Structures are given as structure tokens and as C-alpha cells.
Image (cartoon, rainbow, N blue to C red):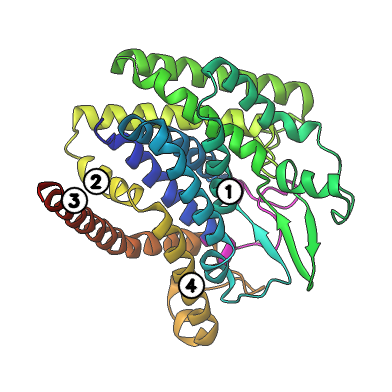
Amino acid sequence: MKRLPAIDTVRGIVIVLMILDHTRFFFSPSIFSPTDLQHTTPALFTTRWITHIAAVAFILLAGASAHLYGLRHGERGTRPFLLRRGVFIAMLELSLVKFCWNYRMDFSMTYLQVIWAIGWSMVLLACVISIPRLVGFSAALCCILSQYIAPAITGRADTLPELLSALLCIPGTFVLPHNMAFHTSYPVLPWFGLMWIGYLGAPVLLARSVQARRKLMAYSGLACFALFAVIRWQCEDTSSLTAFLNVQKYPPQADYLLVTTGLFLFLYITVEYFHEHSLSLLNPTLSIFNLFGKAPLVIYMIHLFFLQILRNAINWYPSVFNSIPIFNTTPEGLFHLSAVYFIAALTSACMLPIALLFIRTKNNTSRTSIFKNSKEYKI
């Protein structure tokens, strides 16, 4: 089956949103959480809220991509691929990704984040790809909802049930020998359940015609929004729009997953429509996002490194950057939100040649591998 351009393009769009979120983290215009409704501003809250879709889109697309890989290589080829790639990605969280976040390999506190969750979710997915679809959907929902029945963690996860709960269900901190501390920002089980949904849902959608697929995705997205609204009206403060939309990501609550999944489905429908109709004004933009979507892991690591370098440069040479209006700070020494958007756009632009280089290198390597294999076959 041919590679679906809409998948790479959607992944590229959420990569840019991820860059915006990480830029806000490194150059935050506030000393409080952007979702702290007592202190945040509408612009800051919106900036954080629109980036919520990134993690959900990455996980769902990883599941769908695993299905597409299985169409080409079969179950026997897919399982070892997911195992190898999953362990490799999870180990990146403890090595290169950790270094890119803080320039140090100090394990006095390590945050296990989205790369960690994606890696181990792939490993778990390799173990369940043979399970029938109906049973799989039910089990995946149970994984997503496991956070609601997991043992509570008070302080550090010192007991075995608390440790398992921190690793699998809800965020928690645990300490290993030699004073190595870890905090699971992304406990694996809810995110694995979401990846499993992506894996099981992909054949349901892709087996249909384009029009039928879009209709099913649209109805599914509307159902997600409707369930989200019911949950928020029943359980949460609705005194303002920001309060109504303020969802919890750590761990991913049901309302968070519903609204972000709905947004993802409508984003995919829109991107697929633009690809089909080849709108000339949008083609260059779609092509750029498509390139980003073909090199997600490389861009994830390199953009963190780039943001670290830029932040250090601003700290080392404040007089140079303060002369640039966009980098003027508040009396508290904080950047304005406009600077965050400017830096995010600059970072995204700098990632484009890196994506091109990676794709070109990967394609050349693939051709060389194919050529060698063909020679061996002829011999």
C-alpha cells in the first residue's frame, strides 16, 4: 500500500504545534502555569490549549502507521519491527532526548515523557496485534480508563503497587539505587490504549472509500465533542469558556482525550481534502508539513537542542538580543508571548533543511539496500 500523504502532513502540523509548546516552555512569558485560570491570560491559555492535540495525534498516527506497516510486511514482520523500534525509542528518552532537554546526563531526576510512552506502547502493541478487533477495542478502552482504578500515590512511589501505578497508570515519582529518581509524566498504559485504538481503527477507516471514510471520521469527531461537552457540564466549572475547556493531560483524562481526538479527526479530514483537491495556494505549505512529518523523531531531538542553544545565547549576550524589539522583556525579565511565536517560527524554519537532509539520506540508504539485495538474489 502506498504511503498516505495526509498522515505525514498531519504529523508535520502537530510537530510545528509541539515546537510552539516547547518554545513556550523554554521562553515562557509567565512564571505560572498557562492553565492556571487564576493567573493566565486568554492568549497564553489558548497557546497551551491548541498544543494539547500534539501527543494524541502522535500516538494515534503511530498506531495507524503500525497497521500500514503490517499491510506490507505481515504480522510476522510487524511484531519484531515494533519490538525493536519500541525499545530503541524508549531508550532514546534516557539518553539523547534527556541530553537535548537539559545538556546533562544527570539521573538525579529524569522525566519519562512522550518518547518513553511511545516506545513502550509499541512494545506492548507488538504483543497484542493478533487479538481480534472487537476484543482489542474493549481492552484498549480498559487501558485508557485504568488511571481511574489505579492505586493512589502519596508522595514517592515506594511500594510495588505504587511503582506499577506510576509506571503504567498515573504520574508518579520513584527512586532507584544510586539516587536515581524518575517521574513518569506519561504513564504508559493510557497512551498504549490510545495507540491500540489507532492501530485497530486504521483498517476500519482505510478499507472504505474516501467519502465514506470522511463521513465516519466526522461523525466520530462529533461524538467525541458531544461526550466531552457532557462530561464537562456534569463534572467541571462552566463559569467561563477557559474553565470549560481546561482539561487535564497528566494523566490524560477522558475529557482531554475526547476533545483532542475530535480535533485530530477533523484536522485529518481537512488535510486529506486539501491533498485530494491540490489547492495551488496551499500546496507549498502542505509540502513543508509533509516533509516535517517524515522526520518526526529527528526533528523532536534537534529542535530541543536548537532551543537550548538559542536560550543560552540570549542569556550570554543579553545586550545583543535586547536591542532587537521582539526580544524585549517585561520588568520581571520574561519574554512577551509574541517572542515565543517568533522563536517557534524561526525554529520550525531551521528544522526544514534538517528534515530534507534526513529524508534524502534515508532514501539513498533504502536504494542502496535494495540494490544490494537484488545483486544477492541474482547471484
61 or 74, nearer to the observer: 74
Q: Residue 147 shows which numbered tag?
A: none
Mark 2 vs 4, N-terminal side: 2
Cα distance in 3D space between marks 3 and 1 = 48 Å
User: Residue at (78%, 26%) from the top-left corner?
Assistant: 235
Circle 4 SS class: helix
Return the disc, 2 or 3, that comes first in the chain's sequence.
2
- The residue under the point 56% across, 30% down is 128
Label 2 amino acid?
Ser
Question: Real-space Cα distance between discs 4 and 1?
Answer: 20 Å
Residue 40 screen position, x and y as percent: 68, 51
Q: Position of residue 121 (x, y in %)?
A: 57, 42
User: What count of labels does the image hold?
Assistant: 4
Q: Amino acid at mark 1?
A: Arg
Mark found first going from the N terminus, 4 or 1: 1
N-terminal of the two: label 4 or label 3?
Answer: 4
- Mark 4 touches mark 1? (CB < 8 Å): no
Discs 4/3, front: 3
Q: Give how far apart the Cα atoms at labels 1 and 2 are.
A: 26 Å
Magenta region: which residues? 23-45
The residue pinned by badge 4 equals 327
State the CA–CA distance, disc 2 to disc 4. 30 Å
The residue beneath circle 3 is 373
Q: Residue, x 48% and y 72% (percent of image)?
A: 327
Amino acid type, residue under disc 4 in the picture? Phe
Whether pointer 4 and pointer 3 mark residues with C-beta atoms closer than 8 Å, the reply is: no
Circle 3/circle 1 CB separation < 8 Å: no
Mark closer to the observer (2, 4): 2
Residue 287 numbered mark, or none: 2
Which residue lies under the disc numbered 1? 48
Q: Position of residue 270 (x, y in %)?
A: 35, 29
Does residue 80 lie above or below 175 as drawn? Answer: above
